[in-house]
Amino acid sequence: MTASEKVAVKSAQKASFGKVFAVQIAAYVVLVVLALIPGISYGNAEEPAIVSFTVVASVAMIALLAVFNPFRDGVAGHAISVIAGLLSVVCATTMMLGRAIFPAGLGDEDTFWMQEGWIAGVGGLLILLIVVSFGRQMARENRTHLIRSLSHNVVEGVAMIGSAGWCFLSTLLPIRSGENAASTDYGSTTVWAVAVIVALLLIIALDACSYWWNRDADPDPQSKNPWIGIALLPVMISGIVVGIASYATVMF
């Protein structure tokens, strides 16, 4: 490929920040709309776990980032990130991990918040992601662009893992009362307000960063419309902010 052809390909992969911002706004609108729909209850009839329909958007973003991927970490790196993201969704929507870590009767409590199980799962997945990504780079015979490949794999994995945090968006919206994953029975209105405000500020900051990410991106020449993946990155990473904010509202 000649220099002029490389420039042409790179230009075709770029998009105005207006398009990037439009994708982000559309993603947030879809997430809020899905969060307003009553979720699916299961488990204890008195204190059911409730899975929000935002899980559909979380999985969809994982799939879209895999297709419109702006990272140069190879097929193996993409696969590792997708698997980590799907495991994070499992942690956010089931009680298995939470029951294992927070058994009934621990600390005189007869239940646990699903946010606790998810956050514990995220911690484990992030550690595994870093270990696997580093080991994969060390196993390469030719370690060219090692730092770039490692950082791309980790950032992609963090975005995939964080996407599941949007499963708890309904807990931040005053739409109904309940327990576990869909609780709006806030321990403190002040804590809820602070959590929501801080979460919004961090989400706005991440969206602002995507301007420079889009401007300075150097995706794989084989990538198709990688700007879409760049647009989704701050939305997916913001899921971690949403999950932590949700945890704060039910714990304090």
Image (spheres, rainbow, N blue to C red):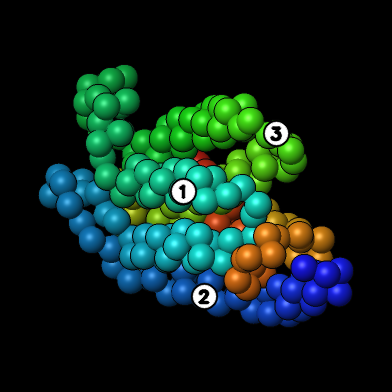
Check the image and name the residue furthest to the left.
Answer: 45
Cα distance in 3D space between marks 2 and 3: 42 Å
Closer to the camera in the image, 152 or 185: 152
Q: Position of residue 35 (x, y in %)?
A: 40, 66
Amino acid residing under circle 1 = Ala
Q: Earlier in the sequence, mark 2 or mark 3?
A: 2
Residue at label 3? 143
Residue at label 2? 29
Cα distance in 3D space between marks 3 and 1: 20 Å
Q: Position of residue 42 (x, y in %)?
A: 17, 52
Residue visible at 40% across and 56% down in the picture: 167
Callout 1–callout 2 Cβ contact below 8 Å = no
Q: Nearer the viewer, mark 1 or mark 2?
A: 1
Amino acid residing under circle 3 = Arg
Closer to the camera in the image, 192 or 162: 162
Q: Earlier in the sequence, mark 1 or mark 2?
A: 2
